[in-house]
Amino acid sequence: MWSPHFINKGRLAGLLLLALVALGGCASGPGPAADGKGETGPDGKPMVTREVSPEAQTLYEQAVASMASGDAIDAELRFQEFLLQYPDFPGAHVNLAIIFADRDDFQAAENSLADALIIDPEHVPALNQLGLVLRRQGKFVEAESAYTRAIAADPDYAFAHYNLAVLNDLYLQRLGVALTHYERYQALAGEDTQVTRWIADLTRRIETAQRAANVTE
C-alpha cells in the first residue's frame, strides 16, 4: 500500500526553496505570503520600512539568489556581510540557519535562529525553521512547540501547518492532528496532489483504526 512515509524529494526541495526569507523581518505591505517567500511588493521585490542602502538591498537579493541556485558558500558570505551592516534583520539570520542546517551544523543553525528570535520573538519563518532543525535532531516535542508558536503568531502560515502535519503523521503518530493540519495547509496553499493523497490515506487509516476499536469494544 502507498505510504506517506515516502516523501517526494522534488517536493521537499521545493519546500526548502520556498523557505528563503526576504528582507521581510521589518517589512510592510500585504504580510507573509502563504508560499513562505516573505513579504513582497507588487513587483515581487522585498519591501522594507527601515531604510537600507541600495547596495545592501542588492547584496541581500544576491545572497537569496545564490542560496536558491545552490551556492551556499557565496550566499553565506553575502548574508554575513549584510548582517555586519544590518544585524537586526531576522530574515538574514533565518537564511543562514537554513544554510547551516543543510550541512548538518545544527548548533550553528539554532544560534542563528536564536539571534532572529531575539530581534522578533514572533518571527514566523524563524519559528518554523527552528521546528525543522529540532525535528531533524529527533527533538520532536520541542519541534512541535516551535511549529505551534509559529501558528499562534500567524494562523495562516501554511508551511507551519504542513510541517506540524508531517511531524504528527510520521513521528508522533497522532493521525487526527496530522489530518487537521494537512487539510489546513491545503486550504491555505492550494491544491497539492501529493498532500491530497496523504489526506486520503490518513482518512482511511483513521477509519480503519476506529472500526477496529469498535470491534474490540
Image: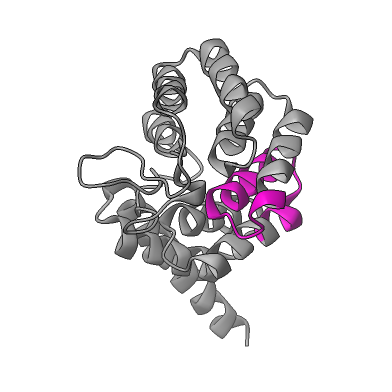
Q: Is residue 209 left or right of residue 53?
A: right
**Residue under the point 38% across and 33% down:** 14
Residue 147: % across, % down: 60, 58
Q: Is residue 140 left or right of residue 40?
A: right
Q: Is residue 204 visible?
A: no
How does the figure colour the protein chain or chains?
A: one colour
Q: Is residue 74 left or right of residue 68?
A: right
Residue 31: % across, % down: 38, 58
Is residue 43 shown above or below 212?
above
Residue 68: % across, % down: 41, 23
**Residue under the point 51% across and 43% down:** 5
- Foreground pick, 119 / 196: 119
Q: Main secondary structure of the magenta part?
A: helix
Magenta-highlighted residues: 118-144
Q: Is residue 214 magenta?
A: no
Is residue 56 shown above or below 210?
above
Is residue 191 shown above or below 70?
below
**Residue under the point 37% across and 29% down:** 10
Q: In the image as oriented, which residue stretches furthest toward the bottom?
A: 217
Quadrant of the frame with the C terminus: bottom right
